[in-house]
Image (tube, grey):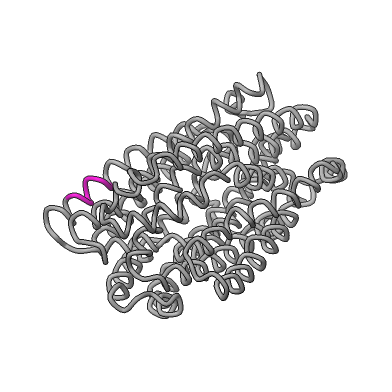
Amino acid sequence: MQQNTALTEGVIWKKMVVFALPILIGNIFQQFYNTFDSWCVGYFIGDQALAAVSSSGSLIFMMIGFFNGVAMGAGVLIARYFGSKDIKAMRLAIHTDVAFGLCAGVLLSVLGVLLTPTILTLMDTPPDVLPLSIEYFRYYFCGTVFSVLYNIFVGILHAVGDSRHPLYYLIFASFVNVGLDLLFVGVLGFGVGSAALATTISQGISALLCFLKLLRVKEAYRLSVKEIRFHLPTFKKILSYGLPSGVQNSVIALANVVVQSNINGFGGEAMAGCGSYSKIEGFAFLPITCFMQALSTFVSQNLGAGKRDRVKKAIRFGLVTAVLLAEFVGVVSYLFAPQLIAIFNDKPAVVDFGVRHMRTICLFYCLLALSHCMAAILRGAGKAKVPMFSMLGCWCVFRVTYITVALQYVNRLETVSSAYPITWALSTVVLGIYILKGNWLSSFEKETKIGKEVTA
């Protein structure tokens, strides 16, 4: 088994940074080409097209969040087996994971195309934006299978400590997406659906490159087409790790769809302004995302290898670094909010809505970093139910209840916006108390037969 990608040896902070940095750079490129869709349609087509594309995040995440959460559980399991050097169990998990991705991707494509008009109508999408939104989403969901498989393949590579190759493939796909956006929208004038088509093609390319990489590696995690099938005991284990994350993703995304519906109620300019912020927010969250993924993989590999002290040191470094980076980005975002929103649309009303939304939220990114990273630590330790219940209660039930009640008294955009930092603070307190107790780390040591139970 290849050891130069393992996170179980070497200087902890160096290993984490070397692993997290390619994830950060890759996420920047991914967010860049997602953002370029919004800029391109806003610049070449107009405000309504920008609103249609910019409001896409909540709906897309609601549709794919469940399956990506299950795939996340598979990644934790694969990293655990990689750390414990249980090759047989690792290979069963990898091939079951890919089989799941194929089935899930096809199912999502069908459901997305069929349900898009209904969901967008339930979200109170304004009538002048609805046709463009339907067009964009239907083109996007036609290629969801590529998005799901890409996340599956990247999850496998990350689980074994390889964050460099996904970066290379993502950079290439990003340039393809930008080129196709300019060609389809700017030169040929195909409309908003072509921006989604460009994204679908680029996702297909990145998924293909990851697939070819896994087919050609010489290490034990090499993918074999003949072995791609569901191994029931392994799939049950994957579900036990990933189902809580999948449920958490979907229900929180559903709650955010409700939030988006309330934003839609303020009109197309509010949709465009808040949608523009969501693209900026995607960049702002990148330090959080990369350390979240690094922490989950690091914890899982090292617990699999029985290195508990190494896990504790990594947790301290990861949490402090993620919080400092997130808050730095938050301060910069607050100071330059008008300029950043205007990149996508410089219409005064759109900028005003975007800035108000952004400045209510961005100074509290430190709380988001803490919540996400603590959740990642627990998922890496196989305790995914804890962040699931915490975030469902805080980010879903409380968030929706708060907005529903508060808007009755203060019908302003800031009322909706404030729901985010308030619920981040609540989840931070809940997860922090659980982690400080330390029971989750002690209970892990009872799982001494993790691989044998699956492969017997």
Residue occupying image coordinates x 45% and y 50%: 150
Residue 313, compared with residue 275, is above or below; it is above
Image x and y of residue 189, in percent: 14, 60
Furthest residue toward top:
11
Is residue 261 covered in magenta?
Answer: no
Q: Nearer the viewer, residue 452 or 355?
A: 355
**Left or right: residue 332 compared with residue 83:** left
Depth check: 172 or 102 in front? 172
Q: Is residue 353 left or right of residue 426?
A: left
Q: Is residue 181 magenta?
A: yes
- Above or below, comparing residue 246 to residue 324 in the picture: below
Q: Quadrant of residue 349?
A: bottom left
Left or right relative to 232: residue 271: left
**Residue 308 is drawn in which quadrant?**
top right
Q: Which residues are magenta?
A: 177-182
Percent coordinates x, y for residue 442 in the rendering? 87, 41
The extreme left residue here reads 187
- Based on the displayed image, in which of its 4 quarters is residue 38 positioned? bottom left
